[in-house]
Image (cartoon, rainbow, N blue to C red):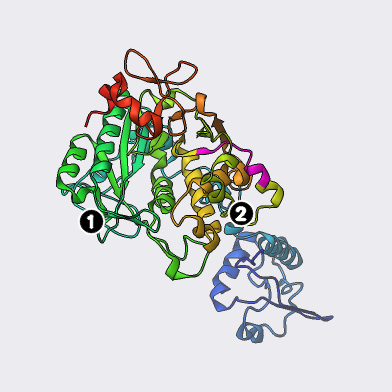
């Protein structure tokens, strides 16, 4: 809405046959010197008047006709502009100034691109957490704040910092312009309860033996460094707080630090903002589901540092090849199907189908039937463009908060595979309309899931597992499950990747 400027139009004009009363709001004696200078600048008579600017001034010249100014004395020049002309010009100038909008009206409105992405139903915005030049170059900020070391726990994801670490800094535009291309990121999640240091769920019970997790984690880290150097990619682990952190085990923490692995602590407990029900007694501590809130919060602040991102299970997965060279990930999220053996479609899965449909809040009967005809997805390995992955994690966390009802929890209190299927096959165009989706079937997938394979496995001379097309998948998943778990230990793959 336009606002008036500092100048105002006359508030009262009265005309008579002998006088014109001309009053302006907001002007008084302080403008009398201005009036005198105006007379001199216009070359008018010293006695020419523009009208009284105060009651006192009006009384001084009450007998003089204001419209024409004072009559010139005999012998004086009658040249110069008339009072009528001056009044007309002044009135026009006041009108123009009054009609001009203030400067803040002319300022551009904030762009929607500056808002956080992926509010429900809103167009996806780009993630620019750093200056524009910095987003096109490498991260030159100190990385010590992400190293393993003393623990700083809290409710939101917190990097585990070294004692002498400097505060995080964003690179300046000049530094970013001189920097190398952005790095890639490989991350996993290994978190335990902060109070007991154990894992716990309604179905699996309490498990306090961490050694299987540590063994799988070491294999996973070593396999990453076989294909991605420290100069090429960062390795990060989202972990718990307190006793639930990997840093709480001195041996493991020291080994991870030696390998250059970064630790970020987070909270994995249910809360009112993370579920769709209102029963606090049903809240659980759940890494599988609540990891997405931790991941989304971290990537919203740090995705600008990276080019591509790979999320992978750590307990039963290894990298055989560069995952970022296998698929074009620009602006995309890449999913791996895991339909194999007796489970080719979601309707064939005794666990996957109810986990998906019981959480399909508001999905029509026709859409539910269509979900049963889709290929089950591997929720343990996902990759994509860094910004796209940040948007994906935000979308999945919002979907978790939308569909986690008591009916959803009745199937399994802690899972996210069904939610993966829902987002990719049903809600994608609503939550991620501007993100490219790539779904690859099992035999061409980025991650080769062996859990449902009837037999195992083709191994090349270098110890790589081959798919049915005799190609080397970038990631091998569930190598310790089913037929694969029995056969691979005695192969070249076991000697290369499964060393304790």
x and y percentages locating residue 282 in the rendered image: 44, 66
x and y percentages locating residue 119 in the rendered image: 56, 53
Task: Please rate how many residues cluster around mark 1, counting C-alpha atoms within 10 Å: few if below 14, some from 14 to 19, many from 20.
Answer: some
At 66% from the left and 59% from the top, the residue drawn is 100
x and y percentages locating residue 20 in the rendered image: 77, 78
- The residues colored magenta run 369-377
Instruction: Report if residue 374 lies within the magenta region.
Output: yes
- Number of marks in picture: 2
**469 with respect to 75 (left or right):** left
Q: Circle 2 sits on which residue?
A: 106
Look at discs 1 and 2 and give the one toward the viewer: 1
**378 with respect to 305 (left or right):** right
Q: Circle 1 sits on which residue?
A: 243
Task: Decide which of 207, 379 is in the foreground and name it.
Answer: 207
Point out the tag, 1 or 2, that comes first from the N-terminus: 2
Return the residue found at the far top: 461
Q: Note whether 264 is above or below 488 in the view shown.
A: below
Dividing the picture into quadrants, the one containing residue 137 is top left
Q: Secondary structure at mark 2?
A: helix
Task: Decide which of 291, 436 is in the foreground and name it.
Answer: 291
x and y percentages locating residue 479 in the rendered image: 36, 31
Task: Decide which of 420, 308 is in the foreground and name it.
Answer: 420
At 50% from the left and 44% from the top, the residue drawn is 392
């Amino acid at each position: 809405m336009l606002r008036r400027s500092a100048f105002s139009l006359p508030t009262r004009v009265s005309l008579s046959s002998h006088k014109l009363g001309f009053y302006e709001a907001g002007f008084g004696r302080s403008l009398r010197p201005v009036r005198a200078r105006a007379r001199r600048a216009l070359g008018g008579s010293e006695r020419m008047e523009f009208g009284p600017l105060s009651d006192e001034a009006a009384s001084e010249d009450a007998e003089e006709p204001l419209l024409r100014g004072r009559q010139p004395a005999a012998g004086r020049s009658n040249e110069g502009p008339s009072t009528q002309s001056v009044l007309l010009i002044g009135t026009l100038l006041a009108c123009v100034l009054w009609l001009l909008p203030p400067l803040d009206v002319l300022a551009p409105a904030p762009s929607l691109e500056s808002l956080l992405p992926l509010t429900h139903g809103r167009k996806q915005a780009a993630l620019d957490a750093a200056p524009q030049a910095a987003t096109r170059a490498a991260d030159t900020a100190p990385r010590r704040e992400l190293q393993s070391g003393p623990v700083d726990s809290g409710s939101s994801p917190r990097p585990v910092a070294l004692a002498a670490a400097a505060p995080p800094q964003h690179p300046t535009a000049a530094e970013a312009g001189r920097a190398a291309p952005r790095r890639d990121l490989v991350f996993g999640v290994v978190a335990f309860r902060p109070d007991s240091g154990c894992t716990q769920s309604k179905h699996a019970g309490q498990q306090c033996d961490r050694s299987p997790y540590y063994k799988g984690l070491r294999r996973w880290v070593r396999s990453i460094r076989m294909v991605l150097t420290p100069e090429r990619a960062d390795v990060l682990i989202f972990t718990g707080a307190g006793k639930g952190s990997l840093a709480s085990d001195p041996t493991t923490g020291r080994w991870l630090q030696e390998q250059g692995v970064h630790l970020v602590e987070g909270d994995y407990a249910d809360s009112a903002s993370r579920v769709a029900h209102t029963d606090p007694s049903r809240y659980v501590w759940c890494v599988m589901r609540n990891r997405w809130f931790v991941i989304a919060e971290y990537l919203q602040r740090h995705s600008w540092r990276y080019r591509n991102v790979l999320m992978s299970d750590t307990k039963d997965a290894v990298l055989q090849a560069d995952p970022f060279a296998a698929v074009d990930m620009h602006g995309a999220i890449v999913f791996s199907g895991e339909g194999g053996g007796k489970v080719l479609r979601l309707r064939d899965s005794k666990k996957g189908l109810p986990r998906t449909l019981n959480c399909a809040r508001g999905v029509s009967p026709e859409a539910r039937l269509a979900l049963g005809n889709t290929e089950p997805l591997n929720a343990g390995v996902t990759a994509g463009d860094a910004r796209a992955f940040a948007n994906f994690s935000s979308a999945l966390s919002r979907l978790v908060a939308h569909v986690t009802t008591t009916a959803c929890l009745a199937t399994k209190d802690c899972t996210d595979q069904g939610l993966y299927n829902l987002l990719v096959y049903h809600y994608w165009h609503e939550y991620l309309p501007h993100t490219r989706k790539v779904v690859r079937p099992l035999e061409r997938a980025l991650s080769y899931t062996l859990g449902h394979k009837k037999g195992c496995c083709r191994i090349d001379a270098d110890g790589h597992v081959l798919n049915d097309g005799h190609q080397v998948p970038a990631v091998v998943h569930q190598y310790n499950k089913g037929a694969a778990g029995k056969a691979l230990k005695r192969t070249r793959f076991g000697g290369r990747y499964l060393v304790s």
